Image (cartoon, rainbow, N blue to C red):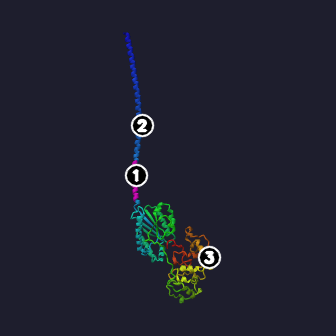
């Protein structure tokens, strides 16, 4: 029994030990699970903490972006409002600009002759024509677009030329036209630039530069077809597509060669502007012959002498050489008065023979002078002139001969035709060599004058330059009164030569 009891106790003890070990094993197992659980929880908490931090940062960034977006939206709205306002301002007063060189773009005769009323009418017709043209040819141009016109011209010179050409009855008529044109429309101006070479050209060119890229100016009508000089101005913009689109050349007289070659668009208003240059008729020395009265030396005569008794003449000048309607009476003049009895300045003119064919076909007086002089070329000019001395008869040298109309008539010059042609090709400045002096050269701006000043000439060449000078019209026409002027064409007063040659006059 005892043995069995002892065995039982041992068995019970072993069972208790294994049971405790099982508990420890189970405990250790649970403990390991707790460690794994804690590690998991710590990992989750760590990750959550990082997410919270990132979320906080993201929230800050979002708030900043939201503020920026709000600011940007406000700026965009303000910018759109500004653009709308600027677009409204830019489109508020569109206009078409018409720039005219009035020395060459001449209005039709019917407007000029009507004086001030003609100017008002011309302004209205031009305004209507430009509006219609712009509506049809300029993109985005409203039908009632404003029209601005600037006409730049030497008004006194233009008035004189138009009067001589018979376009107007008197210079004041053209001045009245200019006033009427300016008054006709509020944006129309006829600007008198005064006398002087290229003054109108410079103002027209500067106005083009000023308005070319002005957004309000939708189109520029540039009236310059008569003058090749404007090709230099327009050539500066041929590479600009915008300029080619914004400038249209306005045609009056046919375009000069260099202008016609430019790639600009063109327009023409034939009912408003002349399409031909002004032609001044030659001085009529062949009508209504007046009795010839040679000059008389008054020394030794008294007031009762016949020489002081006025003759029956329609002219206001005491000495009036003339040409009759047919040229043959010149021979009777030659037969009745010997060359020795005539004044020195008339001998060459009156003693030259004229063919019967010329007598039956009267020509202009200046053509006659050229023909009679060319009929007898002379290689040696009068020695008294080359020597720098004045003619022996001082009174004759100071006299200016005039016809019935008061136009100056100079004596024919003896010259060598080949020598004159040679000098003409040299392009020397007449004012510098035989006039009162070139204003550009004297002012140290010889580059402004297109002619040469540095060539040294002999007395004989200077004499032949007088023949060349007679081919250059003077702005004072045939009424110049300077006693030593080389010809009625050259003004020694410094006013310039050939003023109207490039103006269509």
Q: Is residue 72 magenta?
A: yes
Q: Earlier in the sequence, mark 2 or mark 3?
A: 2
* C-alpha separation, residue under disc 3 versus residue under disc 1: 83 Å
Dot 3 crowding, Cα within 10 Å, few <14, some 14–19, many 20+: some
Question: Quadrant location of residue 396?
Answer: bottom right
217 versus 274 height, above or below: above
Circle 2 residue: 50
Instruction: Tell me the magenta residue range.
Output: 69-88
Q: Earlier in the sequence, mark 3 or mark 1?
A: 1
As helix, strand or loop, the secondary structure at mark 1 comes to helix
* C-alpha separation, residue under disc 2 versus residue under disc 1: 38 Å
User: Closest to the observer: 398 or 13?
Assistant: 13
User: Closest to the observer: 7 or 121?
Assistant: 7
As helix, strand or loop, the secondary structure at mark 2 comes to helix
Dot 1 crowding, Cα within 10 Å, few <14, some 14–19, many 20+: few
Asked if the residue at tag 1 contacts the one at tag 2, i.e. Cβ–Cβ closer than 8 Å, the answer is: no
Point out residue 3 in the picture as x, y percentages from the top left corner: 38, 10
Task: Answer with left or right where residue 11 lies relative to residue 479.
Answer: left
User: Closest to the observer: 129 or 482?
Assistant: 129
Asked if the residue at tag 1 contacts the one at tag 3, i.e. Cβ–Cβ closer than 8 Å, the answer is: no
Q: Earlier in the sequence, mark 2 or mark 1?
A: 2
Q: Which mark is residue 202?
A: none
Q: Which mark is residue 76?
A: 1
Q: Quadrant of the N terminus?
A: top left
Give the main secondary structure of the magenta stretch: helix
Circle 3 residue: 460
User: Closest to the observer: 101 or 12?
Assistant: 12
In the displayed orientation, state which residue is furthest to the top: 1
Asked if the residue at tag 3 contacts the one at tag 2, i.e. Cβ–Cβ closer than 8 Å, the answer is: no
As helix, strand or loop, the secondary structure at mark 3 comes to helix
In the displayed orientation, state which residue is furthest to the front: 357
Dot 2 crowding, Cα within 10 Å, few <14, some 14–19, many 20+: few
């Amino acid at each position: 029994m005892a043995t069995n009891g002892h065995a039982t106790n041992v068995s019970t003890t072993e069972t208790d030990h294994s049971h405790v070990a099982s508990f420890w094993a189970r405990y250790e197992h649970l403990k390991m699970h707790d460690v794994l659980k804690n590690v998991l929880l710590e990992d989750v908490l760590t990750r959550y903490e990082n997410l919270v931090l990132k979320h906080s940062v993201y929230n800050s960034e979002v708030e900043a972006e939201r503020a920026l977006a709000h600011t940007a939206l406000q700026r965009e709205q303000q910018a759109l409002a500004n653009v709308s306002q600027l677009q409204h301002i830019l489109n508020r007063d569109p206009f078409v600009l018409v720039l005219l060189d009035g020395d060459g773009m001449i209005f039709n005769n019917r407007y000029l002759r009507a004086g001030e009323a003609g100017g008002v009418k011309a302004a209205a017709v031009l305004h209507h024509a430009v509006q219609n043209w712009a509506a049809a040819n300029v993109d985005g141009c409203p039908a009632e677009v404003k029209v601005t016109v600037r006409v730049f011209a030497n008004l006194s010179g233009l008035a004189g030329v138009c009067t001589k050409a018979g376009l107007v009855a008197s210079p004041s008529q053209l001045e009245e036209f200019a006033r009427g044109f300016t008054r006709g429309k509020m944006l129309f101006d006829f600007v008198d630039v005064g006398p002087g070479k290229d003054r109108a050209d410079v103002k027209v060119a500067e106005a083009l530069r000023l308005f070319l890229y002005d957004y309000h100016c939708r189109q520029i009508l540039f009236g310059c077809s008569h003058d090749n000089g404007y090709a230099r101005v327009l050539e500066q913009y041929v590479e600009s597509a915008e300029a080619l689109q914004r400038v249209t050349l306005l045609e009056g007289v046919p375009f000069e060669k260099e202008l016609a070659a430019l790639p600009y668009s063109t327009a023409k208003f034939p009912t408003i502007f002349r399409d031909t240059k002004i032609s001044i008729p030659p001085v009529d020395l062949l009508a209504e012959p007046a009795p010839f009265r040679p000059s008389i030396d008054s020394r030794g005569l008294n007031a009762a002498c016949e020489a002081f008794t006025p003759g029956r003449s329609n002219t206001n000048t005491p000495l009036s050489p003339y040409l009759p309607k047919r040229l043959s009476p010149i021979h009777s003049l030659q037969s009745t008065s010997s060359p020795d009895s005539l004044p020195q300045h008339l001998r060459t003119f009156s003693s030259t023979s004229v063919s019967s064919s010329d007598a039956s076909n009267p020509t202009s007086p200046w053509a006659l002078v050229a023909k009679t002089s060319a009929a007898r070329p002379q290689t040696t000019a009068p020695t008294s002139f080359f020597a720098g001395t004045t003619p022996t008869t001082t009174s004759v040298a100071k006299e200016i001969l005039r016809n019935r109309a008061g136009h100056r008539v100079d004596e024919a010059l003896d010259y060598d035709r080949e020598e004159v042609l040679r000098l003409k090709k040299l392009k020397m400045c007449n004012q510098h060599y035989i006039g009162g002096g070139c204003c550009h050269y004297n002012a140290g701006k010889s580059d402004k004058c297109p002619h040469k000043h540095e060539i040294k000439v002999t007395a004989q060449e200077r004499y032949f330059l007088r023949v060349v000078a007679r081919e250059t019209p003077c702005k004072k026409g045939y009424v110049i009164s300077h006693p030593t002027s080389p010809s009625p064409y050259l003004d020694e007063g410094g006013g310039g030569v050939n003023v109207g040659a490039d103006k269509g006059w």
